[in-house]
Image (cartoon, rainbow, N blue to C red):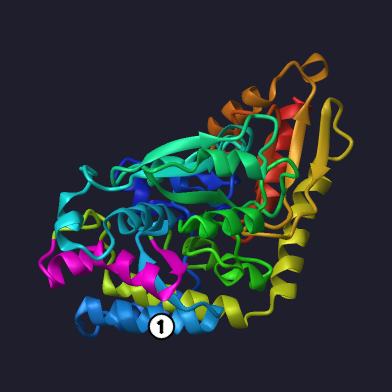
């Protein structure tokens, strides 16, 4: 049952709260900070602190926890990508830092596999361009070879970017190992978008330990506020990234592109608390809970004509388990998109989605409050029983 005061803080503004059956998506608010994270953030209210110092100390704590040379707290994983490309292009040259996003006189091309942009439906490469960088594809839609990368490297190449998706590895993409080997042989850094690669725990910092110069993490997946991310990398890379940040803009009075990427001291402490929690919690219990809640929805939908329920057995990354719903329009008279729309029109609205490149609904329990999985399962079942 929905509590009588559920969503009242939003309703008081005339806004409509929703049940989030989609998962950890930015559009719906991203995350619910864990209780210990909220407590740490509240304690941070009690004093002010120079944020350049807090970034340094918090970054060192996180780097030690995840076993990488250096770390920096950013305004989400997307911010980390933008700051990283700015750092690669401008380095520690204050004149170049202030010149961005004008890249005149700088190497500004970031190489990225065509398969990882289009075949993997990588939406967030736009973040790499916001500081003035230009994305250049290499390889084809079908596959990427070592030779493709070697031939793509030119006089204006600044770095090579890689999209890590261990839940569904792409056998036809160039591996990260080959990417690092070729890039470093040509004096180029490698950046990795690994926003959701937070489990198994070894994935936190894995790509930096493999030799990449940078990887980003979305800390919202670990119970931090959704507006917090992590940049992990070499000491040199993270130092130069920090020069682009809002804290450096104010503390050094050097106008880097990161000034709009502000986060507060409470969020920084929240990120530290979230990483500590994630690295020490019982993940077996977490996975069991996700599986049980998923099965609650699955059991509500079994045996409904025209509806095929496909449980997801993946536990890698940020959203374990969940399910895919395949809707047979010839039997139900509805498409998957019709189901999404009708769930949104209910009271309370339930948000699900059909991804642009798919024809089925994916449901995750990440964003569901306790007991809401029962509401989701029953509401979907009711649509088909009418």
- Span colored in magenta: 228-254
Asked whether the viewer can see residue 71, the reply is yes
Q: Nearer the viewer, residue 169 or 6?
A: 169
Reading the image, the residue beneath label 1 is: 60
Task: Give the side of residue 97 with respect to residue 147, left or right.
Answer: left
Asked whether the viewer can see residue 348, the reply is no
| Residue 163 position in % (x across, y down) | 57, 49
Specify the quadrant that holds the C terminus.
Answer: top right
Residue at 41% across / 83% down in the picture? Answer: 60
| Residue 112 position in % (x across, y down) | 52, 42
Tell me, yes or no, whether the highlighted magenta stretch contains residue 89.
no
Q: Nearer the viewer, residue 102 or 298?
A: 102
What is the secondary structure assignment of the residue under circle 1? helix
| Residue 76 position in % (x across, y down) | 40, 58
| Residue 300 position in % (x across, y down) | 80, 44
In this rendering, is residue 175 above or below 290? above
Residue at 41% across / 40% down in the picture? Answer: 126
Q: Residue furthest left?
A: 253
Task: Give the side of residue 50 with respect to residue 61, left or right.
Answer: left
């Amino acid at each position: 049952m929905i509590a009588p005061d559920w969503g009242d803080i939003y309703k008081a503004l005339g806004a409509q709260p929703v049940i989030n059956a989609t998962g950890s998506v930015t559009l719906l608010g991203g995350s619910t900070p864990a209780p210990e994270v909220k407590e740490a953030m509240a304690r941070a209210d009690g004093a002010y602190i120079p944020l350049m110092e807090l970034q340094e100390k918090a970054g060192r704590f996180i780097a030690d926890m995840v076993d990488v040379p250096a770390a920096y707290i950013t305004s989400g994983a997307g911010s980390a990508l933008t700051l990283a490309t700015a750092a690669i292009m401008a380095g520690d040259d204050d004149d170049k830092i202030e010149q961005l996003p004008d890249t005149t006189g700088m190497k500004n091309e970031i190489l990225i596999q065509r398969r990882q942009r289009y075949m993997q439906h990588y939406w967030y490469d736009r973040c790499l361009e916001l500081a003035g960088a230009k994305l250049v594809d290499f390889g084809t839609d079908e596959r990427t070879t070592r030779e493709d990368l070697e031939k793509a490297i030119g006089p204006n190449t600044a770095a090579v970017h890689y999209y890590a998706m261990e839940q569904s590895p792409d056998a036809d993409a160039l591996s990260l190992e080959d990417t690092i080997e070729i890039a470093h042989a040509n004096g180029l850094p490698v950046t990795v978008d690994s926003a959701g690669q937070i489990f198994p725990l070894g994935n936190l910092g894995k790509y930096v330990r493999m030799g990449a110069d940078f990887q980003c993490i979305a800390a919202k997946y670990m119970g931090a506020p959704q507006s917090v991310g992590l940049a992990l990398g070499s000491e040199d890379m993270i130092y130069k990234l920090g020069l682009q940040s809002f804290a450096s803009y104010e503390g050094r009075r050097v106008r880097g592109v990161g000034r709009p990427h502000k986060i507060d001291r409470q969020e920084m402490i929240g990120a530290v608390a979230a990483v500590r929690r994630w690295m020490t919690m019982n993940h077996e219990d977490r996975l069991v809970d996700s599986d049980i809640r998923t099965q609650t929805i699955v059991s509500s939908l079994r045996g409904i004509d025209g509806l095929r329920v496909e449980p997801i057995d993946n536990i890698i990354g940020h959203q374990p388990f969940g399910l895919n719903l395949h809707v047979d329009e010839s039997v139900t008279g509805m498409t998957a998109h019709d189901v999404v729309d009708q769930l949104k029109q209910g009271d309370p609205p339930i948000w699900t989605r059909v991804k642009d490149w798919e024809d089925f609904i994916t449901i995750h329990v990440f964003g569901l409050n306790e007991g809401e999985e029962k509401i989701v399962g029953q509401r979907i079942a009711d649509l088909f029983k009418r």
